[in-house]
Amino acid sequence: MWQWSDDAGGWRDYDKERNKIIETAFQAKQPSAALTINGNAYNVVFQKKIRQVRVDDSFYYRDVRRLVEQGEKTVVWVDDNPHNNEGLVNEITASGIKVVQLTSTCEAIKYFQRDDLNTENMRVVSDMARDEFSPSSDRKEMITTAGVLLARRLAVELDVDIPYLIFTGDYWQDIIKERWPFIRSCTTTQECRDFITFKDLSLSGLVTNFEMYRDPTRNDKEDYPSYWTPFREHADVVIDNATEEFKCIDRLMNGTLKKNHAYGKLNNTFPSKYKVTRVVRLQDVMQWKLYNVQREKMQRQHKKYRDTPGYKETCKLLRDNPIETSKYSQQDMNKDIREVYLFHGTNISTTMKIKDLGFDNRVGKVSGMFGGGAYFADVSSKSAQYIPCSTCEGGNYFNKKRCTCTCKEDQKDLCMIVSRVLLGDFHLVKKYDEKTYKGTTKHPVRRPPNKEGLNGITYDSVVAERKEWDGCVEWREFVIYDRNQAYAEYLVYYKRVL
C-alpha cells in the first residue's frame, strides 16, 4: 500500500491503479515511477526519502511512503551493552517484529548504507553514551553523546528519515530536551516498548525533525571563526602540525608553562616542555550557537558599563599585567568583552563529556575556592595539575599519589582543553573571604558577586589575582557561572618532557 502526504500532514492512499504502477516500478528496482494526476505529470522518486515530484520547473513535491505487512516491521537497536535489552528484545521478537542489534555508530552507518535496505516500517533505538572509537582518536573512548551523533549522521549524511528514539536515564534526557529537542528520548521501559511495538504510527522521521529545527542562517560563514573548515552539525578537525594554527597552540602550551606547582610532575620532576602530538579543533553547531548568542548579549551589555570606574580600573590592570594567553593568540577574539583563550584540565572521561556537551556547572563540584563555577587558567601548567598521569593516574590534584613514570616515548598522551571564555565585566579578587566567595555547605556560591548599587545585577565572571600583584593565588584563576560563556574549541594531546 502506497500513501502520499496531504497539506495537513496526514497520509492518503493512492488509488488501486496508481498503487500498482508505483509498486511495479519499486519491485523492479527502477529509480522512479511515472504518474499522471489531474493532468499533471509526476515522478515518484525512490530514494532514502521517497517523494512525488512534479515534472515542471516548480519541482513541487510531496512525501510518499510504502506500508508493508506486519511481519516486515524492523527495529534497529544500537547499544554497546546489548545484554541490557534482552527482555524487551525477546518480547518484541516473539510478537513477530524483527530486531537488528548493533553495538556501535560505525556498525549502524554501514547497515544503513546498504543499497538493498528498505527503511519503510523501521525504527531505531539507541543508547546515549557508548564506548567506541572517536573520530579524533585512534583508541576507544566513552562518547557521551553517541546517540545524538548517530542521529545526526543518519539524517544529515544518509538522509534516513525514520522514527528514532534515545533510551537513556533522567540526567541525559534533561540535556537532550534542552539541547536537541527535535530528538525523541525516553527513560522508562514502557515508553520504549510503545515505540518499538509501533503503537504510535504518527511519528515523524529524523530528516523531518532536523529540517524543522534547522536555522537556515546557521551556516553563514560570518557566524563562525574565519579559520574554521566547512562542516555540518559537528566536526572534529585534526590540525596539520605544519600549519600556523598548530604552532600557535604549541606556543600557547609551552609559552605559559611554569615550574612551581604542587602537581603535574613526571617522576616528581617538573617537565621542561610539553610535546604537542595532536591538536583537534571542535566545531559544533549547537554549542557554538549558544556561545555566540551569549557573546552578542554581552556585547550589548558592554555599552552600559564600559565607562564605569570599575571597568576602567580592570582595563588598566590588564594593560599592566596582561592575561598570559593573550600574548600568544588573539584570533577572531572580541576584546570589548574580554574574550580570551584559557586552559581547563580534568580527567579524560570528563574531557570527552565537555567535548560533546560543553561546560555544565550544574554537575560541577561546589568545593572550589569560588563555589560551583567552571574554572580556567591562563597558565597551562596550572591546569595540567588536574590531569591524571595517563599511565599511573597519579600526580594530580585529585589523586595526590606521586607519579613515578619515566620520560618515555611510549607514554600515553595527556589531553588539555583550550577554550574560548567570555570574561566580560569581571569581579577582581585580591583579598579572599571563604564565606563570600565559596559560601557554605548549605548555601554554596553559584554565581558572580552583585555589583554595588545596581539592584542585584551581577558581574560576568570572577578573576582571582596573583599574589605577586597583591592577590590571593599563585597564578590567576578565572571562574564563570554561565555555561554558555565558554566554548571548548581545542583538544590538545601532549606528552611531558623532562
Image: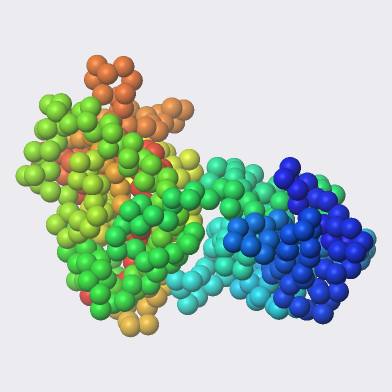
Say how the picture is coloured.
Answer: rainbow
Quarter of the image with the N terminus in it: bottom right
Res. 404 image quadrant:
bottom left
Q: In which quarter of the image is residue 463?
A: top left
| Whether residue 10 is visible | yes
Q: Position of residue 416 (x, y in %)?
A: 34, 62
**Left or right side of 229 for 451:** left
Image height of 458 relative to 246, above or below: above
Screen quadrant of the C terminus: bottom left
Q: Nearer the viewer, residue 338 or 270?
A: 338
Q: Which residue is drawn at 24% across and 51% down?
A: 333
| Residue 256 horizontal/vertical position (percent) | 19, 60
Pinpoint residue 318: horizontal percent, then vertical percent: 12, 43
Observer-nearest residue: 12 or 87?
Answer: 12
Which residue is found at the position 40% from the left and 51% from the top? 288
The one of 199 and 391 positioned closer to us in this rendering: 199
Q: How many labels does the image show?
A: 0
In the image, residue 127 lies at what x, y percent? 66, 58
- On screen, residue 312 versus residue 230, left or right, reads left
